[in-house]
Image (spheres, helix red, strand yellow):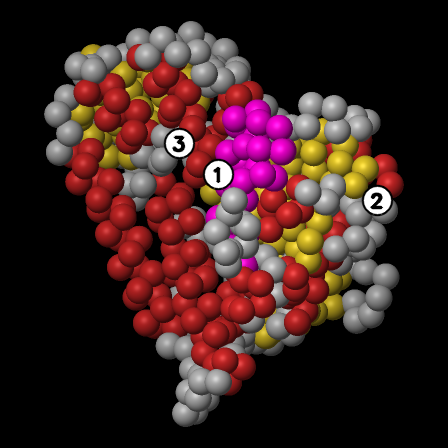
């Protein structure tokens, strides 16, 4: 027997539940399917748990720095990892249960728990249930990737998901991968008390960033005695006694790094390989991401893909924007598109990196005339007052249209201050609008108008994309 709905939503990440709420409020009958924990990656293994633990690590770090602020702690600082985990679990469980409760209490919405699989372009099975709808929305997210590196079968390794389950402190943590996941976990566990080594195959950390940003982040981590190994062309793992050994084919010695545990932080892969997409005729790319057009439609009429599984954003905020695009197009007669949005994200190292729009390297590659302004955080009063002066701010502007092309704020409050730039970009306002704005003192954001008042031709400024200089 087949049960018919107006819409079927597979997955309860950031896009799915919000779409269900819009559809049911419009009187549509909706089925939503979840095979694991409600809320998706962000709530369960991504943003919420990791930033909760980052907060615990920051508290430990500031406690150790207490004397810098004239505060006596009265003894050595210790971290209770069982309590750190318990705090994280309480917050994530509350969020996940909140999503579950909302969906199960929603009128016109039926929740199915189990693995979903396509039977045809308009039919989905969940266990013994068979569901059909003219509109089906895939919101299944991603999971940590485990590459087929030599020796991977000889060691017990953690991913960013499984590391959340431990309640002890690894004495020596090796991290394979120098992207945002590896850096956030690396700094976090160093502050908890682990010795940390980060191993990266590229010639710099955070390879998508400009060279000055990558170099500054590396310096910040090394200030906290985190060891960084770059240019690790060939990485092989092995077990020697109680140690994990990572053989690193680098230009410098030693040729191996030893640790008690290893974290693989080498990217993510989409949860699309067990959906039976071939039975629906849905096209995926060579990495398994579902191919969508500018309005999230797949190649099969009546099937959409939202969130991380489509490879068009990979962030909570882009997943939520996917929902907004689909809802606007289907319910509001408002033709919104993926191409309307700018690149924007934050890396939650301490200090954080806030990013919006194009990098300096991308602007240079485009060949357009541009202006750039920079300021070190050592010249930001708010940072000096807080004793957190690492990093810098950089903004790039189109010299002809005067619109802001992109910005990087690596520094205290950078994840918040970047929105001043981002909002101006969406408004397509000339940079002079922000330059003449009166910002509140003392804040980090108050220096954005100052930077915009001291722009220089990008062509006259030294290349920063690889040298790491210029900050």
Residue position marked by numbered label 1 in the rendering: 315
Instruction: Name the residue rendered at 60%, 51% in the picture.
Output: 447
Neighbours of disc 3 within 10 Å: few (<14), some (14-19), many (20+):
some
Q: 104 or 74, which lies in front?
A: 74
Picture quadrant of residue 12: top left
Dominant secondary structure (helix, strand or loop) of the stretch shown in magenta: helix
The C terminus, quarter of image:
bottom right
**Residue 55: image location, x then y, percent:** 42, 63
**Is 443 part of what is drawn in magenta?**
no
- The percent position of residue 327, horizontal first and vertical second, equals 34, 18
Q: Which mark is residue 461?
A: 2
What segment is highlighted magenta in the picture?
A: 412-437
Does 272 sit above or below residue 279? below
Can the viewer see residue 125? no
What residue sits right under mark 3 in the picture? 320
In the displayed structure, 173 sits above or below 234; it is: below
Q: Earlier in the sequence, mark 1 or mark 2?
A: 1
């Amino acid at each position: 027997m087949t049960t018919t709905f107006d819409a079927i939503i597979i997955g309860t990440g950031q896009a799915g539940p919000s779409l269900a709420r819009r559809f049911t409020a419009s009187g549509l009958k909706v089925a939503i399917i979840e095979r694991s924990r409600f809320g998706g990656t962000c709530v369960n293994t991504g943003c919420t748990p990791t930033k909760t633990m980052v907060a615990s690590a920051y508290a430990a770090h500031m406690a150790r720095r207490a004397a810098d602020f004239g505060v006596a702690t009265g003894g050595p600082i210790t971290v209770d990892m069982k309590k750190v985990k318990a705090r994280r679990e309480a917050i994530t469980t509350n969020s996940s249960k909140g999503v579950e409760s909302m969906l199960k209490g929603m009128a016109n919405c039926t929740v199915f728990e189990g693995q979903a699989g396509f039977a045809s372009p308009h039919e989905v099975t969940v266990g013994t249930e068979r569901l059909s709808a003219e509109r089906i929305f895939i919101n299944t997210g991603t999971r940590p990737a485990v590459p087929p590196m030599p020796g991977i079968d000889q060691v017990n390794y953690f991913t960013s998901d499984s590391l959340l389950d431990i309640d002890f402190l690894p004495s020596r943590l090796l991290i394979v991968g120098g992207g945002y996941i590896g850096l956030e976990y690396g700094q976090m566990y160093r502050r908890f008390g682990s010795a940390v080594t980060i191993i990266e195959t590229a010639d710099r950390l955070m390879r998508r960033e400009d060279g000055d940003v990558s170099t500054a982040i590396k310096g910040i981590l090394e200030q906290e005695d985190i060891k960084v190994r770059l240019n690790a062309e060939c990485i092989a793992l092995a077990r020697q006694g109680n140690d994990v050994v990572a053989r690193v084919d680098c230009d410098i010695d030693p040729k191996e790094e030893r640790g008690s545990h290893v974290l693989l932080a080498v990217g993510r892969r989409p949860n699309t390989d067990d959906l039976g997409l071939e039975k629906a005729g849905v096209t995926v790319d060579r990495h398994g991401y579902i191919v969508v057009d500018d309005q999230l439609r797949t190649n099969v009429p009546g099937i959409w893909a939202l969130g991380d599984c489509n490879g068009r954003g990979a962030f909570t905020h882009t997943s939520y924007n996917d929902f907004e695009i689909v809802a606007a197009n289907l319910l509001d007669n408002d033709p919104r598109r993926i191409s309307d949005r700018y690149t924007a994200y934050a890396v939650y190292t301490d200090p954080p990196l806030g990013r919006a729009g194009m990098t300096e390297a991308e602007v240079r590659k485009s060949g357009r005339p541009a202006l750039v302004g920079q300021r070190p955080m050592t010249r930001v009063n708010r940072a000096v007052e807080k004793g957190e002066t690492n990093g810098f701010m950089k903004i790039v502007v189109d010299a002809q249209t005067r619109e802001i092309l992109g910005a990087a704020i690596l520094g205290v409050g950078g994840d918040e201050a970047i929105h001043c730039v981002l909002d101006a970009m969406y408004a397509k306002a000339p940079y002079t609008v922000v330059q003449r704005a009166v910002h509140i003192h003392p804040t980090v954001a108050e220096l954005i108008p100052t930077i915009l008042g001291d722009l220089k031709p990008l062509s006259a400024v030294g290349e920063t994309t690889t040298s790491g200089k210029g900050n």
